[in-house]
Image (cartoon, helix red, strand yellow):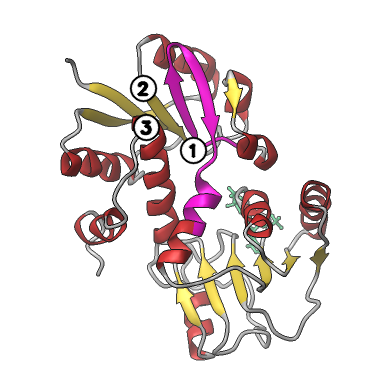
Amino acid sequence: MSQKQLAIIGNPVSHSFSPKMHNYISKKLGLDYFYSAIEVLDEDFDSAIENLTKNNFCGFNITAPYKVRIMDKVDVLSPEAKLFGSVNTCVNKNGKLYGYSTDAPGLYRSLIHEGIDITDKDILFIGAGGVTTPIMIHFFDKGAKSISIINRTIEKAQKISEYVEKVCKKKVNVGLDKSHYDIVINTTSVGMHPKTNQSPVYEIDYIDKNTAVIDLIYNPEKTLFLELCEKKGAKTVNGLGMLIGQGILSYELFTNTKLPDSIFDDIMKDVFNRK
Ligand code: ATR
């Protein structure tokens, strides 16, 4: 049988770790899939998706800037993808495209791996990036006690808050409403390479040794924000786990398999050279 094809679609994609990660999993499991990166221009998006579907690609990941646009191309949306308003994984089943969103569940999986529990926790989101809404909905679904959001542009935070409140029937506080948060998560791009000398916030009185802080950025490995939080004694986690978590879940959807739990550490070690 010929090799089965997978890919990531976006612009740019040349720096994506997904090909390395997915090809590693295939090799490790002895499955005959090949995963490539396909950079697609705005004007070529429609035809690119049609070609992938026609050419029997088993599935593909979608990254920026197409995670919302792809929703129109999908025949069957998973309930989560519909609620999240975003698709990062498409599976081609006999010419029909099924759309899923593995970003938020991927983050959740990586947090379990880190021993961070969401249940009954007061959670603060810093920023209104594209993955904020899915993560909030997923965290409420997993038992978060309260969710608050701060953002440079307050209107964007308000919009997210209104949407999540409607979907989850739970209040999302806009602004700092507590003196302490159990979990703080940065979804902004502030501090990302090459502007590593910036932090989204500097006043962090609400963070202490009982706070777990997650920065979705993984380059650099430790952002200035995480450094500041570490100085206050917080447990810190970068975004590499989310990248790995969403990749594992996508791979499981592409191949209709369940990967062993050990694959997370294998990828961390063998693909990313981390312990
Ligand atoms: P995504 O691609 O996921 O939407 P992004 O555009 O890289 O993410 O980042 C969006 C988030 O980073 C927003 O919360 C944005 O704040 P605004 O809503 O005010 O634009 C935040 N962000 C980006 N640059 C920022 C900066 N210099 N200071 C503060 N927040 C910033």
**Of marks 3 and 1, the one in the foreground:** 3
Q: What is the C-alpha distance between the residues marked 3 and 1?
A: 21 Å
Pick the residue in front: 66 or 106.
Answer: 106
Instruction: Tell me: residue 150, above or below residue 51.
Output: below
Callout 2 environment at 10 Å: few (<14), some (14 to 19), or many (20+)? many
Going 23% across and 57% down the picture, which residue do you hit?
266
Of the numbered discs 3 and 2, the one sitting upstream in the chain is 2
Which one is closest to the eye, mark 2 or mark 1?
2
Q: Are marks 3 and 2 in contact (CB under 8 Å)?
A: no
Which residue matches tag 1? 63
Which residue lies at the image location 56% right of the left edge and 64% below the top edge? Answer: 190
Q: Which residues are magenta?
A: 86-108
Mark 2 — residue?
A: 58
The answer to whether residue 95 is left or right of residue 178 is: left
Point 24% across, 29% down: residue:
34
Residue 94: percent from left, percent from top: 42, 12
For the residue labelled by badge 2, is the local secondary structure a helix, a strand or a loop?
Answer: loop
Q: Which residue is mark 3?
A: 256
Which image quarter is the N terminus in?
Answer: top left
Q: Amino acid at mark 2?
A: Cys
Q: Which of the four quarters of the rendered structure image does ligand 1 lie in?
A: bottom right
Look at 84% across and 51% down and name the residue there: 162
Mark 1 element type: loop
Above/below status of 265 relative to 69: below
- Which of the pair 92/162 is nearer the observer? 92
Look at the numbered disc 3 and give the secondary structure of its residue. Answer: loop
Give the class, few, some or many, for how many residues have Cα within 10 Å of label 1's Cα (few <14, many ≥20): some
Which residue type does callout 1 highlight?
Answer: Thr
Determine the CA span between mark 3 and mark 2: 11 Å
Q: CA distance from mark 2 to mark 1?
A: 17 Å
